[in-house]
Image (tube, coloured by chain):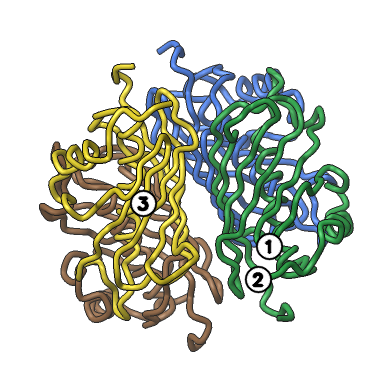
Chain colours: A green, B blue, C brown, D yellow
Amino acid sequence: MELKLTAAEVEAYLAEVFPQVDGRFRILDLAPMRLTCEMAVSEVNLRPGGTVSGPAMFELADCAYYMVTLAMIGRQALTVTTSCTINFMRKPQPGPLRAEARILKLGRALSVGDVLLYSAGVEAPVAQASLTYSIPPDRPR
Amino acid sequence: MELKLTAAEVEAYLAEVFPQVDGRFRILDLAPMRLTCEMAVSEVNLRPGGTVSGPAMFELADCAYYMVTLAMIGRQALTVTTSCTINFMRKPQPGPLRAEARILKLGRALSVGDVLLYSAGVEAPVAQASLTYSIPPDRPR
Amino acid sequence: MELKLTAAEVEAYLAEVFPQVDGRFRILDLAPMRLTCEMAVSEVNLRPGGTVSGPAMFELADCAYYMVTLAMIGRQALTVTTSCTINFMRKPQPGPLRAEARILKLGRALSVGDVLLYSAGVEAPVAQASLTYSIPPDRPR
Amino acid sequence: MELKLTAAEVEAYLAEVFPQVDGRFRILDLAPMRLTCEMAVSEVNLRPGGTVSGPAMFELADCAYYMVTLAMIGRQALTVTTSCTINFMRKPQPGPLRAEARILKLGRALSVGDVLLYSAGVEAPVAQASLTYSIPPDRPR
């Protein structure tokens, strides 16, 4: 399967439909079924001790998977998360986080895949997420 | 098992260790192994169409479960989420969300349970989450 | 929403489509969106020390949720599990296990809910599962 | 981290502690933190239409992850699954299934990782699982 959108198109679309997250997520690499992106971490995402909060990590995993799915299916704002399992494995450093998302199945109605989260200065992943997105039925094919 | 903290003590402790979330979560009811709380939803938590974002729902589930666990084990700031599975089932209304958290197992090292999220004006739950928290080994018993 | 099948009809249908499981699952109680059933545990389901194996508990959760979904939507053999999260919390006794399944959302395409598993002689649940079933699109409505 | 057991030692240990599964699982490849194995599928694991049942896929994911964890920590029979999330993505063929397990975090108390399941003749994975195993506290280090 081929990409329907470029990295720049995905970022522009995200800024359009989710103005709140605009500018915090930057795509580092995009290939069919795979995307790597980075999330800037601000004060509000930190926890005492300087680590990144769980909800911020969830948001990154969720957004990375949304972006890789959109890159494959095109602009479908109504594509929504139906489920996410996230395992928190290591304490991230207070800096930016990187997400590596891959689609394992892109069906007509569901996109299923996983995301690994990395923190600068920590070699092993800090979190792993499995996600399912529901794709609106009326999408053009 | 009995409560180690009152609702007021849990709220005060949350404000102390997570200053960022202070004031957004209000405990409505607390009993051994069960807690109901409400999260105020601000502009930043909304999505186009007026619905509450997935990360905001995750944060509520996570925080509700943290609070019920603390109420049972006492002030243990290092208690951290190790995993969460969340199923998004219905679109919430743009108002506040309510969480009903229950502990299914409170062991020495892990607290395992679930949370149902409700939106004002929607009778059925909008999301369901299963969570595991790790409890620091050195807690006084 | 109302039941489309009785407990006897669900059991008969299960025996027809899954001959391998016939006779091991018995419905104890069935109401709209809720079902309680029991699984007989045989030697092959046991683990050293006499506890029930994880795969056997998964099978019970999966089958209980399949049955409650069928009871609501009617005979739809192609209804399949798309995801399951199961938390194992306590060691079951070697006897039969009981499952309490409830549907939290019954949509056109997905049935989402959870199951608690109980072991005779253990008051608290031994496992908790969240499941999503996909419902074939051509079902009569 | 290094392997504590060889593939033959893991298979022999599995046969000893879980006599019921003996002979059904064969390790194809073992490296630190990674294991590939194959499960023979018998009549009892099949579903109408010739596909492999969900519980059989769960069993394979669970057993593959158990084996890779044991290979890293040594003979610790009391190592038990605490949670598993499994996403079923494609219908497997009726033949043997292959599992590729990797450990993402091997801590003192928990082993966290994932497993992809493949069916002969289907290029993409048929299922993905994330697992957490609890490691008994008294293990020699």
Q: Is residue A42 above or below residue B123?
A: above
Residue at 29% from the left image edge and 79% from the top image edge? D48
Rounded to the nearest angstrom, the CA distance separating label 1 from label 3 is: 27 Å
Q: Nearer the viewer, residue D81 or A98?
A: A98
In front of the other: label 1 or label 3?
Answer: 1
Rounded to the nearest angstrom, the CA distance separating label 3 from label 2 is: 28 Å
Give the total number of marks visible in the rendering: 3
Identify the residue position indicated by label 3 in the image. D61
Q: Quadrant of the N terminus of chain A?
A: bottom right
Residue at disc 3, secondary structure: helix
Near mark 2 (Cα within 10 A), the count class, few <14, some 14-19 or many ≥20, is few
| Protein chain holding label 2 | A
Q: Are marks 1 and 3 on the same chain?
A: no
**Residue C37: image location, x then y, percent:** 26, 61
Identify the residue position indicated by label 1 in the image. A32
Decide if residue B22 is in sight here.
Answer: no
Report the side of C25 relative to D109 (left or right): left
Q: Amino acid at mark 3?
A: Ala
Q: Nearer the viewer, residue D31 or C131?
A: D31
Name the N-terminal-most of marks 2 and 1: 2
| Protein chain holding label 1 | A
Decide if residue D82 is in sight here.
Answer: yes
